[in-house]
Amino acid sequence: MAQIKKIFEKQDMREGQPWKKVLLFSIPLLLGNIAQQLYSTVDSIVVGQYVGDNALKAIGSSMPIVMLIMVFFIMIGTGSTIMVSQYFGANERENLSKAVGTSLSWTFILSLVLMALGLLITEPILRLTNTPESYFQWSKEYLYIYFIGVHGLSFYNVVAGILRGLGDSVSSTVFVLIAAMLNIILDLFFVLNLGMGVAGVAIATVISQFSSAILAIFRLRKYTDFDMAWRYLIPDGMISKNLFSLGIPSGITQGVFSMAMLFVQNLTNTIDIADINMMVMRVDGFAMLPNFTFGIAMATFAGQNIGAGQLDRVKKGRKEGLILAMSITAFLTLMIIIFGKNILGLFTRTPEKIDLAYSMMMVLAGAYVVFTVTQVLSGIMRGAGDTVTPMWTAIFVTTMIRVPSAYAIAHFTKSAEWPHGQPIAIFGSLALAWTCGAIITSLFYKKGKWQKKALVQQEQQEMQNA
C-alpha cells in the first residue's frame, strides 16, 4: 500500500539530478499521452475497418475544426501550468490557490463558449474546406456531438495541466488510461452492436473524456499545497491577467496552426487523400509524443526552478532533457520505419493506400528528431514565462513556410495521375517547416531573453515599485 501511495507522489523538480527528475516526470506523462492518442486512433481504426474509407475521411476532415476550437483550453491550460509551477516553486500558497480556482472558473466559462461556437462554425467551415458530399454529413454529425460534449475535454486538459504544474504527471496518466480503455469498449459497442457508425465513435469519445475529467478533478481536490475554497473560484483580476497574458500567445499559436490546417485540408481534399492524411497523422501522433511530452516536462522543470531562483539548474536540465528526448524519438522513429506498414494496415484493407501512406511517413521520419529541439527549447521558454517567442516562431514557420510550400509543391508536381499535385506536397512541406522551426527556436533560445520573463520576479519588482 505504501508503494502504491509513493507512485502517486508529485515530483519536486527543484532538487535531485535533472535528467532523472525529467525522466520520472516524463514516463507517466508519455504513457498518458499515448493513451490519449488512442482516443482518436481507435476511432479511426474502428470506422476504417467496420464502416469504410469514407468514414475515415469524414473524421480526417473534422480534425482541423477540432484543433481550431482547442485554442481556448490550450490557452487556459498553458497559462495555468506556468503559474502553478512557478507559484509552487516559490512556495506562494495564496497565489497558487487563486491560480487553481481562477483557471477552473475560466475553463467552465470558455467551455460554454466553445460549445456554442463549435456548433455555429461546423457546417460553414466544412463547406469552406471543400468537404465532399459523400461524407459531409458524417463529418457534421461527428463534430456536433464532439462540441456538445466539449466540457469533458476542456476540464481534463486544464486540470491535467494544473496537476503537472504541481509535479504530478502520474495521476492524469492513470485517469486517461482508464478513459482510453472505456473509449475502446464503447467504440466497439456503439459501432458493432448498435451500428451507429461515425456518430457512435463521437459519443464514445465524449463519454470517455468526461470520465477522465471527473477523475482528475477529484484527484486535484486531494492536494494540500493550496486551498480549494469557494472564494478562490471567483476569478481574481491579477491572476486572470497573468493567465491570459501567458496563455494567449499559446492560444494564438494553436489558432494559426489550426487555420493553416484548414488551408492544407482544403488542398488535401482537392488532391483527394483525406484518408491517407488521416492514416499518416494518426501514426505521426505517436511519433510526436516524446517531443510533446518532453516539451511539457521541460516547461514544468523550468517553471519550478525559475520560481525557486535556480537558473543554472534550468540550463543543466536543458542539455540532459535534449539528449533524453532525441534518443527516445530516434528509437520510436526507427520502430515506425520497421513496422509502419503493419500499423497502417490497421486503418484500411486497401494495399495501394497502405503503400502510399507509408511512403509519406518516410518523408516525415527524418524530421522527428529535429522537431525535438523545437519542443524542448520552447518548453523551457514557456516555463520561464516567455510564451511570445515560441508564438512568433510558430506563426512565421506556419504562414511563411508550411502553407506556401505545400501549395507550391502541389503546383509543380501536377501530373496525369495527380492533376492537383502529389501527396508529397502535404508531408514534404511539414518536414521543411519543422526543420526551419528548430533552427529559429535555437537562435532565440541562445539570445536568452526568456531568462528575464519569470512571473514571480515580475510581481516582486511591481511590489517594490509600488
Image: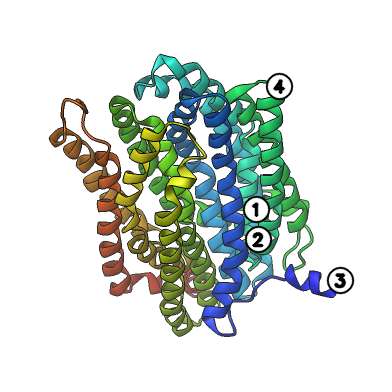
Of labels 4 and 1, earlier in sequence is 1
Image depth: mark 3 or mark 4 in front: 4
Residue 163: which numbered mark, if any?
2
Q: CA distance from mark 3 to mark 1?
A: 26 Å
Residue 1: which numbered mark, if any?
3
Q: Is residue 82 above or below residue 240?
A: below
Q: SS for tag 2?
A: helix
Contact flag, marks 3 and 1 (Cβ < 8 Å): no
Name the residue nearer the viewer: 434 or 316: 434
Q: Residues within 10 Å of mark 2 (few under 14, many from 20)?
A: many
Q: What is the x, y in percent for residue 242?
A: 51, 57
Image depth: mark 3 or mark 1 in front: 3
Q: Amino acid at mark 3?
A: Met
Q: What is the x, y in percent for residue 391?
A: 36, 54
Q: Residue at x 76, y 64 (%)?
A: 223
Q: What is the x, y in percent for residue 220?
A: 73, 57
Q: What residue is pinned by disc 4? A: 194
Q: What is the x, y in percent for residue 186?
A: 70, 34
Q: What residue is pinned by disc 1? A: 159
Q: Residue at x 56, y 69 (%)?
A: 86
Residue 251 visible in the current orientation: no
Q: Residues within 10 Å of mark 1 (few under 14, many from 20)?
A: many
Q: Amino acid at mark 1?
A: Val
Q: SS for tag 3?
A: loop
Q: Residue at x 50, y 82 (%)?
A: 310
Q: CA distance from mark 1 to mark 2?
A: 6 Å
Name the residue nearer the viewer: 160 or 211: 211
Q: Quadrant of residue 7?
A: bottom right
Q: Amino acid at mark 4?
A: Leu
Contact flag, marks 1 and 2 (Cβ < 8 Å): yes
Of labels 2 and 3, earlier in sequence is 3
